[in-house]
Image (cartoon, helix red, strand yellow):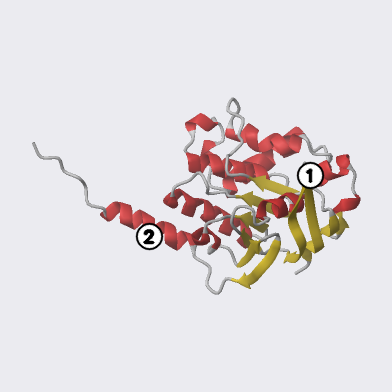
Amino acid sequence: MNVVIQLERVTRTYALGATTVQALRGVSLQIRSGEFVAILGASGSGKSTLMNLIGCLDRPTAGHYFLDGVDVAKLDHDQLADIRNEKIGFVFQSFNLLTRTSALQNVELPALYSSSRISASLRRNRAREALELVGLAGRAHHHPNQLSGGEQQRVAIARAIANQPSVLLADEPTGNLDSRTSAEIMTVFQSLNQRGITIVMVTHELDIARFAKRNVFMRDGLVRKDELVAAPLDSRAELARWNQAEQTEPQLVLTP
């Protein structure tokens, strides 16, 4: 498998008044095509800064970051915008859907800003295919307020993959969801990963990280541990357990 993401001794320093904050202190990391990686760490560990750099939302202070072999630090503002739109799909904790447009129209949005200028019919077909991949083919014309939280997050995932990116970045994608719905979302991610999509997910939840194939632990701006998950959780099996538990849960009977 080829290397999609390569960071070499990357640092990121911020100036806060008279104080200098070192968010990243020399991170080297490789992620290959088709991997499913979870990045973990407490608040202030550097995981969000690392995600911003991987997503081309920020630039390293020093070091090199290569995305599909391209040194993104050498790109100008417009080139960075193009690479974000065409090579990276983003999924956030808050779903960031437009409330007055349908699920299908929300999924189409990234293609509207694509420099490749695809036709309206192709854009619509890709959006329909993306919704089908996340199990929402029958909800294409529903608005966000007609969808559950889990369904809204699946629309957000469909939007992220509509432009067929090299990498799918997910920032705390289950942070606003209950445990059962989180398992549903991880089912979608695992299914997409099985189709060859590279996924990098930031999470602070160890149980969610266990659905990934590899865990990278951040602390104090450095990668402290990088390990393969010996037996990743099977999201479909976890979801089946939740369904069974709900069916067998005793019902509360109120007596007069």
Q: Amino acid at mark 2?
A: Arg
Location of residue 39 in the rendering, given as x and y in whole percent from the top left corner: 63, 60
Q: Is residue 23 above or below residue 118?
A: below
Q: Is residue 47 above or below residue 217?
A: above
Task: Return the residue found at the far left.
Answer: 256
The residue depicted at 75 percent of the width and 69 percent of the height is 1
Q: Nearer the viewer, residue 62 or 230?
A: 62
The residue depicted at 62 percent of the width and 67 percent of the height is 214
From the viewer's perspective, tell me whether residue 35 is left or right of residue 178. Answer: right
Task: Return the residue found at the far top.
Answer: 100
Q: Is residue 42 visible?
A: yes
Label 2 belongs to which residue?
A: 241
Mark 2 closeness class: few <14, some 14–19, many ≥20 residues within 10 Å: few
The residue depicted at 65 percent of the width and 62 percent of the height is 218
Q: Nearer the viewer, residue 3 or 118?
A: 3
Location of residue 106 in the rendering, given as x and y in whole percent from the top left corner: 64, 34
Decide which of tag 1 and tag 2 comes sooner along the chain.
1
Q: Give residue 18's mark.
A: 1
Tag count: 2
The residue depicted at 55 percent of the width and 74 percent of the height is 230
